[in-house]
Amino acid sequence: MKQISTIISAFIMLFMVSCNNQPKPVEEATAPTPAKPAFTPYKAMLITHTVKDFDTWYAAFNGDTAARNAAGLTESSVGRGLDDNNMVVVFATASDIQKAKDFSASPALKETMTKAGVTSAPAVSYWNVLRDDTSKIPQMERLMVTHHVKDFDTWLKAYDGEGMATRAANGLVDRAMARGLDDPNTVTLLFAVTDMDKAKARVNSPELKKIMTDGGVDGPPQMTYFKWVKM
């Protein structure tokens, strides 16, 4: 009887050792979430002017694509003014600012603009784009704010202190920020407008005026309301 008990005990120990030596199931590795690529600032050209007829101008603009590309101007976006539908906003990435400047001053472009029915002297500016949210959103209406500041870093601290959430609660969603290449203390901001009434109330509010004063804005801001028609 003692012998049988010993055999049973040995069998149990052997079974336990065998179980412990079984290979553990391999857990499937979870692929790491790819990091969002860091934003790289880029150069751009901005043109605003008025036209006799938008459709006529737009056809001429599309016909001039090759000339723009040859000047290093790509990814062109076009907007129309909300208050004046014949006011046009053109934004393009610029790979070579000198080429872009030569193109904007060229007789060929002036001739193209004349034939396209441009009725005002084009306002041309060049920018270093520091922030740009290109995610897809349904809102196409925009507010572009351009103003001059005493010191960019002081202004940026006040602007970031206001915060994106506060601006969004007032119908203004941050889309882009740029500094002038010819004058780095000239700043342009671009917002998507989700509620026009709230946005206009915020623009005219004492709270925003105080933020701008604290940030060193030293001139009247230029406000341009428009809607993208090509992005």
Image: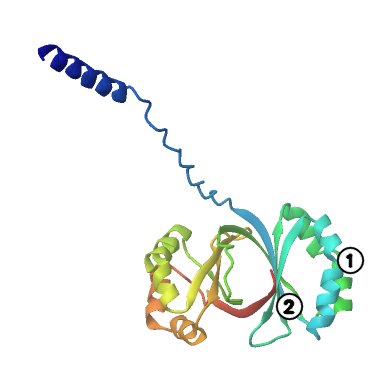
103 relative to 88, above or below: above
Which element type, helix, strand or loop, lies under badge 1? Answer: helix
156 or 195, nearer to the observer:
195
Spot occupied by residue 14 in the image (x, y as percentages of width and height) = 26, 18
Spot occupied by residue 90 in the image (x, y as percentages of width and height) = 71, 70
Left or right of residue 115, residue 90 in this image: left
Visual colour scheme:
rainbow
21 relative to 189, above or below: above
Spot occupied by residue 68 in the image (x, y as percentages of width and height) = 81, 61
In which quadrant of the rendered image does the N terminus lie? top left
Q: Residue furthest front?
A: 1
Which element type, helix, strand or loop, lies under badge 2? Answer: strand
Left or right of residue 87, residue 38 in this image: left
Specify which label sits upstream in the sequence, 1 or 2.
2
Q: How far apart are the two marked residues, 1 and 2, measured between alpha carbons?
A: 17 Å
Callout 1 amino acid: Ala
150 or 114, nearer to the observer:
114
Residue sitting at x 57%, y 79%: 223
User: Could you say which disc has been placed on residue 108 in the image?
Assistant: 1
In which quadrant of the rendered image does the C terminus lie? bottom right
Q: Which quarter of the figure has residue 120?
A: bottom right
Callout 2 amino acid: His
Residue 171 visible in the snapshot: yes
User: Could you say which disc has been placed on residue 140 in the image?
Assistant: none
Which residue is under mark 2?
49
189 or 5, nearer to the observer:
5
Left or right of residue 195, residue 108 in this image: right
Q: Residues within 10 Å of mark 2 (few under 14, many from 20)?
A: some
